[in-house]
Amino acid sequence: MALKVTKELKENRQLAMTVEVDQERVNQEMRKAARKVGNQYRIPGFRKGKAPYNIILQYVGQEALYQEFVEDLGQEMYKAAIEQEEIEPYATASLDDVQFEPLRYTLTVPLDPEIELGDYRGLRIEEPAVEVSDEQLEEALDEYREQYAAWEDSEAGADYGDRMTIDVKSVLTDPAEDEDPVVLEENEWEVTPDQENPMDPPGFDEQLLGLKAGDSKEFTLSWPEDSQSIYAGRSVNISVTVHNVQSYKQAELTDELAQMIGPDFETVEDLRQGVRTSLLEQAQQEAESDYLEQVVTALLEQSTLNYPPAVIEDQLDVMMNETDQRLRQMGLNGLNHYFEMVNQTQEEYRDQNREDAKRIAERNLVISEIVAKEKLSVSDDELMERIKETFGEEDPESESAQNMIEMFRDGPGRPILESQILTQKALDRILAIVRGEEIPEPVVEAETDANDETPADAEGEESAVVANTAESATEDAGADDAEEQPAASDQSPAVDAAAATE
């Protein structure tokens, strides 16, 4: 018997759906519930399980009987309704209300997002030129010189920042009776004159300036009246003898330094060329990442996105799971323990990260649509190549490598790798388009009979959902460590009827 279903399309790709249950089915469920209650409780005047339906109904009440089956029946009716109406939910429906007599379930069903990319093949964005200036090169070389800097004996007079070894004796100019007049007496004392953080008494650092190894000097200094020292307002005669003065000097840019920096450098010129090349590669990587971010942002701005709120909630779930895993790797007890430490609730955390989740989710939707529009797919060879990259130097014939291959080729890991590959393919395709490269139009596959074999060149199958990698990929155009976003088709339809009736 067909269900009585009413539907109304709401904004943000949501469908309001009411499912009315046939009264005959309700009566059946009511009687089953009554038998269950009658077997569980003793009804006055009747043996267990022998009380008639109308007595049980009168004894426990209609609502109590409904509670025995309304949730399970709601699940069943929901699944039957979406099958009957040929609805494909994006995610779990939410139960908004349950009404009795007649029994009606009112739900909100999130539908698949609708993405309109506009004329994405006509998008063109100029790529900035990348270069390394002489100033950048010299700064990088100075960093190497600083790495090999060392303390060297100085024949010049001491300056701020120099390291000095001195003998020093400070004697009060007006000692009181029974008071030790010596304030300080140190031999081979290592000091560094510092203009920002001078020593006591004030002026001591300045008196050391210009002294050389072998020099001696006597001078008098005083503490201010408002000093925090126990000698506030008093003076000392100070004698200093300098044993050694050293300055911290950068290494000279010589062929010997170049050879110390790396085995590929024989001369200073080799070092200069190598550093310039390295700087250029780094600049190109940063420019590529910035350019990709600019491209995806431009694509997003010209696109029209219509999606249910569940998309953002799903992304927040992914972000929370990632944070939980990172915290556990750091030795903490997960996200819930973190919430306790910082006195934050889960909802506050989700609200705090909602804008980031929206930005990431919308980028992922656009990337997923590129995959669909361009008919990108993953071949078995590409998948195996990625699997080999995953276990790296490990022996591919080892048991652990074979287990990994099986998990990613035929097991739960396959969608993850497929999503990573598809995401990178989509980003590469977008970059090729905006750079004006000649890209063939996507090939529309010819329809085949159900009994026909799949064409030999149709290797792999297209992933339904691109993983949650577009954001990280725009930060690092070459990143392969993308993470998976749960696919809508993996979520089983369910409704929480009990929550709506409480």
Image: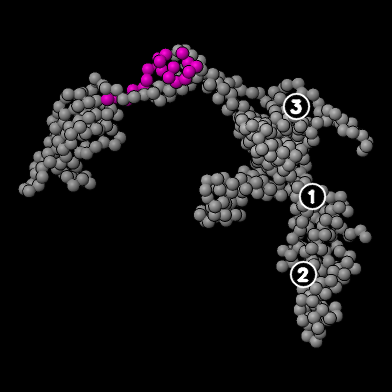
Element under label 2? helix
Residue stretch rendered in magenta on the structure: 246-266
Q: CA distance from mark 1 to mark 3?
A: 33 Å
Earlier residue among tags 1 and 3: 1
Q: CA distance from mark 1 to mark 2?
A: 26 Å
Q: Amino acid at mark 3?
A: Gly
- Location of mark 3 (residue): 122
Q: Quadrant of residue 121?
A: top right
Which percent across, then down, holds residue 166? 20, 30
Q: CA distance from mark 3 to mark 2?
A: 58 Å
Q: Is residue 264 magenta?
A: yes
Q: Which mark is residue 67?
A: 2
Q: Quadrant of residue 186?
A: top left
Question: What residue do we see at 78% from left, 58% from top?
Answer: 107
- In the picture shown, does residue 352 fall above or below 373? below
149 to the left or right of 413: left
Q: Is residue 463 magenta?
A: no
Q: Which mark is residue 182?
A: none
Which percent across, then down, holds residue 460? 79, 33
- Location of mark 1 (residue): 89
Mark in the foreground, 1 or 2: 2
Question: What residue do we see at 43% from left, 23% from top?
Answer: 144
Q: Quadrant of residue 8?
A: bottom right
Element under label 1? loop
Callout 1 environment at 10 Å: few (<14), some (14 to 19), or many (20+)? some
Mark in the foreground, 3 or 2: 2
Q: Quadrant of the C terminus?
A: bottom right
Q: Quadrant of the N terminus?
A: bottom right
Mark in the foreground, 1 or 3: 1
